[in-house]
Amino acid sequence: MAHTEAARLVLERGAPGGHDRAILHVNQPILEIFRPAVPNGAVMIIAPGGGYFRLAIDKEGPAPARRLNQSGVTAFVLNYRLPADGWASGYDAPVQDIQRAIRLVRARAATWNLDIARIGVMGFSAGGNLAAAAVSVSTIRSTRPSTPQTAFRHGRTSPVSAMPP
């Protein structure tokens, strides 16, 4: 399998001096970790909104992640693939990405000192819709490939479920 770097287009928008960036054209999901100074084992995976054609990354990504860090929560911000980019799996592409993110966090919970019983997902706008789909749609959707490459480089599928315990 060929190795490709994850790429995304970052669009600056908003008033001068204020970050309000948008992410477009995510070719491979990116899961960014934000670790608290004093972790309590809880985890939140954050899905930014943007109408499924962009990701409002600053106000709906790192900002809430840092706020959760203040409470001891380890946060992961998911830059998921966008259906507007024409993925073969269409609107299943972001569902596949968030379910894979959940499985990845669960599979590595011990390594990262996370409590597997305290993993949550949240999102803003379209990301909220995605967060709800992540825990209510069968994980079978996430095992169908949408491209010849896997969404994350850490393996094709995982026996760890994305559904809540």
Image: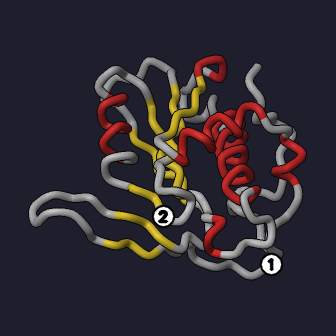
Rendered location of residue 67, percent (x, y): 30, 31
Q: CA distance from mark 1 to mark 2?
A: 28 Å
Residue at x 31% of width, y 63% of height = 21
Residue occupied by mark 1:
1
Residue at x 81% of width, y 36% of height = 160
* In this picture, residue 88 sits left or right of residue 30: right
4 in relation to 80, above or below:
below
Which residue lies most toward the left here? Answer: 17
Mark toward the viewer: 1 or 2: 2
Q: Residues within 10 Å of mark 2 (few under 14, many from 20)?
A: many
Q: Which mark is residue 70?
A: none
Picture quadrant where residue 63 is located? top left
Three-letter code for the amino acid on which mark 1 is drawn: Met
* In this picture, residue 37 sits left or right of residue 131: left
Q: Residues within 10 Å of mark 1 (few under 14, many from 20)?
A: few
40 in relation to 157, above or below:
above
Say which label, 1 or 2, has the lower sequence index: 1
Question: Judging from the image, what secondary structure is the residue with disc 1 in?
Answer: loop
Rendered location of residue 106, percent (x, y): 68, 33
Question: Judging from the image, what secondary structure is the residue with disc 2 in?
Answer: loop
Marks counted in the figure total 2
Residue occupied by mark 2:
54
Rendered location of residue 55, percent (x, y): 46, 59
